[in-house]
Image (cartoon, helix red, strand yellow):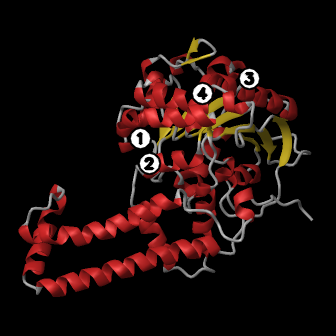
Amino acid sequence: MPEKHSPPPQMQAETRLGPRPLPLHLAIAAMTLLTSRGALPLLRKGSLDWRPELAETAERLRQSAAALDEKQVERALDAAAAKRWGAFLDGVLRYRRHPYRRALPAARLAWQDGTTRLLAYAPKRRRTGRPVLVVPSLINRAYILDLTEQRSFMRDLAARGFRPYLVDWGQPGDAERGFTLTDYITGRLDAALEAVLDDAGAKPALVGYCMGGTMSVALTQCRQADLSGLALLAAPWDFLADPTPMTAALPGILPSLNAAIGTLGELPTDMIQALFLGLDAHLGYRKFRAFAALDPASEKAHAFVALEDWLNDGVALAGPVARECMEGWYIRNDPALGAWRVAGEAVDPAAIRLPALAMVPAGDRIVPPASSLALAAALPNATTLRPAQGHIGMMAGGAAAKQVWGPLADWLKNLD
């Protein structure tokens, strides 16, 4: 029988811990419904501040409310709020108690140093096919690229005849908690490349996803002779090209985040989750209400739980890396300004002469397309593709194989 992955520690419990951070999700949902009740008098007076595109609809709503008995409207609003609150809680509980658990045949362990592992997805006996080294972000589990049997980018690459390897950063241990980006890139990532060269016996293409793409630019610059190409998937570069709400809020909350790092030596998972929740504070409220209406045995429900488990199985960020990213990337915009240095050398995409592919998903709300397009423009030999996907959907969505994995595989096959 094939070896199975053990569920991550938090998934071994009968009831899940997510959505994380749970108190924040509950508070946002509750405040959303409570403020609706408080806004009713302002609606009647016409003094609510609506977005311009909603002004006409808001006026019709105001007129409808004015034509009805005030108490009747209040009772109807209270009933609707109670129904939505119940649906949200039901969705959360259904998720926490869902029987789905991730179980896939284990990939081969090709190399390990500390908490960083290199997983090989092609059979060890396969000696043909281009090696592909895939680098995910440091702040999420690597298995977003190997989520389920139906939605596994890594297994899809192997099925197409490639020899794919995945860097699994793992949770920072005692050693990694003191790492900088230089330690990860010129230490662990450089060693992982050496392991691929030794294991595969050929130059791999380097594929970096999200933050892993930004890190891959730095590795490629100093290891071009050992690589056949560079593919970047939603890789951020110009952090002020189209600032997100999280970017705008970061300077004000940075002292609190730094205080947590100073005490813990890392930026905890729940703090990272809270930061990203700021991109769309009501997302959890909407999606768990929708999940409550699904058949728990349906494919759609299983896909939801698989992705939600990954989202809630987060990874803390080593303290020095967290500071470097928050202050150097998001606030100072060092990469786009040519001021980001790895091992003392400025990271310059213009110095990369290898063929490159930049896949910039049109619907990305985590890494604004303008940020990734700036990196594509800086690479001398880059091809840019704009799949109609979001940041996570491009690697784990139902249309990912057709819109992202297939075009990427075609590009890899055409490398010299």
Whole-angstrom CA distance, mark 4 to mark 1, is 27 Å
Percent x, y for residue 89?
A: 48, 75
Q: Give residue 369's mark.
A: 1
Tags 2 and 1 in contact by the CB under 8 Å rule?
Answer: yes
Which of pointers 3 and 4 indicates the residue nearer the eye? 4
- Name the residue type under label 2: Asp
Q: Is residue 203 visible?
A: no
Q: Is residue 249 left or right of 168 when viewed as pictured? A: left
Whole-angstrom CA distance, mark 3 to mark 4, is 29 Å
Residue 193 or 399: which is nearer the viewer?
Answer: 193
Q: Is residue 265 above or below residue 332?
A: below
Q: Secondary structure at mark 3?
A: helix
Question: Which residue is located at x 32 percent, y 70 percent?
Answer: 33
Q: Give residue 364's mark.
A: 2
Question: Which residue is located at x 64 percent, y 15 percent?
Answer: 343
Looking at the rendered structure, the number of numbered marks drawn on it comes to 4
Which of pointers 3 and 1 indicates the residue nearer the eye? 1
Q: Secondary structure at mark 1?
A: helix
The answer to which of marks 4 and 1 sits earlier in the sequence is 4
Q: Secondary structure at mark 2?
A: loop
Classify residue 88 by image quadrant. bottom left
Callout 3: few (<14), some (14-19), or many (20+) C-alpha neighbours within 10 Å? some
Percent x, y for residue 6?
A: 80, 59
Whole-angstrom CA distance, mark 2 to mark 3, is 31 Å
Percent x, y for residue 412?
A: 65, 39
Q: Give residue 290's mark.
A: none
Q: Secondary structure at mark 4?
A: helix
- Name the residue type under label 4: Pro
Residue 37 or 314: which is nearer the viewer?
Answer: 37
Residue 265 or 308: which is nearer the viewer?
Answer: 265
- Name the residue type under label 1: Pro
Badge 4 is on which residue? 320
